[in-house]
Amino acid sequence: MIERTGSPAEVRRIACIGAGVIGGGWVALFLARGYRVTAWDPAPDAEAKLRRLVDTAWPALTELGLAEDASAENLAVAPTLPEAVADAEFVQESVPENLDVKRDLLARIDAATPPGVVISSSTSGYGMTEMQTECANPERLVVGHPFNPPYLIPLVEVVGGKHTEPWAVDWASAFFEAAGKSVITMDREVPGFIANRLQEAIWREALHMVANGEATVEQIDASITEGPGLRWPLLGPCLTFHLAGGEGGMAHMLDHFGPSLRSPWTRLEAPELTEELRERMVSGCAEAAEGRSIHELVRDRDRAVIAVLRAVHGVRNGRS
Amino acid sequence: MIERTGSPAEVRRIACIGAGVIGGGWVALFLARGYRVTAWDPAPDAEAKLRRLVDTAWPALTELGLAEDASAENLAVAPTLPEAVADAEFVQESVPENLDVKRDLLARIDAATPPGVVISSSTSGYGMTEMQTECANPERLVVGHPFNPPYLIPLVEVVGGKHTEPWAVDWASAFFEAAGKSVITMDREVPGFIANRLQEAIWREALHMVANGEATVEQIDASITEGPGLRWPLLGPCLTFHLAGGEGGMAHMLDHFGPSLRSPWTRLEAPELTEELRERMVSGCAEAAEGRSIHELVRDRDRAVIAVLRAVHGVRNGRS
């Protein structure tokens, strides 16, 4: 087994291959965290666009807090892919979402990157198993799926492919944590990972409603921004429903509202509410609540909703 | 046709029937907006619980801004349902989510409420058509579906039943607007209304993932709170994807990512992306953007995400 070159916390030099909206967002994030970044993108105006993106993002990154040695000066743009990755300790790939392009580029990155260095793909749709087919060293390739913009949204979903070694997944997760991201490490490949599956379910239901004249685009967006969207920055869908159960939490919620899973409240059929599923939801919520009572969760939710409402109103009123 | 008694903006006296978490939340909201509220709930300890709920909510309501003449003193608890609604100019019903209970209570409310006064139900699941069957004056009954907690989350979805007159729907929408809510007026009954359909789609996909071991409760919640949940307080699912299309907006997004609707990214099958659906999404986003360019929308989104991140971090760090 080829071993990784260094510890995730000691990484200083990162290569970003592909410097569009996502790749450029990664560049901005890594620079703000104090890394030295070498980027490569075949588009003729890529460097100018990339530097503009970094300049545009910098005030926000400054507001959120820069690493001590962070500087936009730590960005170099390499003329070729091999030069970009030649001395990288970590590589993030963000080329267009096309399987052939991904396969080809990942193979070229793999061929030019020092042995044992982890290579991560920003793909939002492909599994690593289908992307790593042309690589000589597929064991070090992982998916590291960000959300737009990568320099503001903390989430990154990490998952390997069939030929990825577990150490590479662990290493990538530890590296992203060290870089300040919120990491979800998946133990298997699932199309759309986790967040995109949930997001896509909403999106498809919304498309059905518009197609059927049940709601307009404006109504759909308002139903989220004025409604459940205000709770989701603090409480995900599970803890939200944990609170809907009152003092009895998720257990009461499932026992009481379980039958509504048979109602046509969406076009998506619900799974059967088995004893096992009930138990996973209940114990999962107990863990996720981190010891907070329903009363404490409600208090935190209300504080967060007020703060979020004020934040959003501030932005709306500040529109130029 | 029986006409309404007064204009929505002139309402001063409101009756709230059912004073649990949702009914009590309505009471707190109406008091904060300066209304006089008479509540009724058959539970023996209902009044003590209700006053506690109002007291607990008051600091938050004060922080968000009270109406000039707002006071928790403007709450009376009536010993009987007919006394509660006797001189009401608007009635909000929030009794337990059980069709027989709703039917019975709405008929009793209808019988005791002055003619022409609009009666609104907080139901999150039933259509007004199936609830108004026992009412002598069904034309004035509407659904006014809030989100928990009603005193913080602005959304209320308003829709009539088969026997509801259009004036009652219009009147209720205007009243809720006057009371400071964000109103979505639906022109037809859809099970789950709009927000619950979208929320339920996420919820069912989450249950499937937990049932199949694809994700844990903690991962599902984190995938939202650390990911797309941070964008949704400002941009709903449609405008979010409008931005995912870059400068080309929703049109480019649908043309480019349309094929991904066939991918198994959720268990919910997508509708066919017809020319008509494409046109509705594109023109709907153009309207919802209110003249803002993609660049301006991105700027607003980034400002909002930063403000929301800070708001949520503040609440998390402030946990006692």
Image: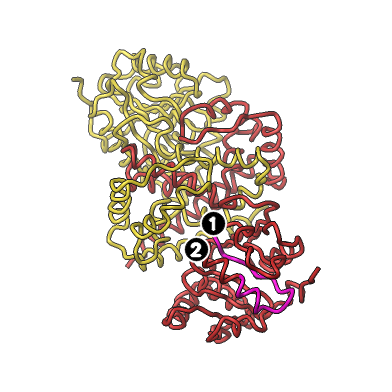
Chain colours: A yellow, B red
Q: Mark 1 or mark 2, which has the lower sequence index?
A: 2
Q: In terms of secondary structure, where does tag 2 sit?
A: loop
For mark 2, does the 10 Å Cα neighbourhood hold few (<14), some (14 to 19), or many (20 or more) residues?
Answer: some
| Quarter occupied by residue A175 | top left
Specify the label residue B97 is tagged with. Answer: 2
Image location (x, y in percent) of residue B236: 58, 47
Label 1 resides on the chain identified as: B
Q: Is residue B108 magenta?
A: yes
Q: Is residue B81 above or below residue B173?
A: below
Q: Nearer the viewer, residue B24 or A317?
A: B24
Q: In terms of secondary structure, where does tag 1 sit?
A: loop
What count of labels does the image hold? Answer: 2
Give the CA separation, mark 1 to mark 2: 8 Å
Do callouts 1 and 2 point to residues on the same chain? Answer: yes
Residue A208 visible = yes
The residue lying at 53 percent from left, 52 percent from top is B196
The residue lying at 26 percent from left, 28 percent from top is A168
Specify the quadrant that holds the N terminus of chain A. Answer: top left
Is the C-beta separation of discs 1 and 2 under 8 Å?
Answer: yes
Which residue range is magenta in the image? B107-125
The residue lying at 46 percent from left, 46 percent from top is A61
Q: B20 left or right of B83?
A: left
Image location (x, y in percent) of residue A193: 40, 34
Q: Is residue A47 magenta?
A: no
Q: Is residue B165 above or below residue A209?
A: below
Residue type (three-letter) at the residue carrying disc 2: Glu
Specify the label residue B125 is tagged with. Answer: 1
For mark 1, does the 10 Å Cα neighbourhood hold few (<14), some (14 to 19), or many (20 or more) residues?
Answer: many
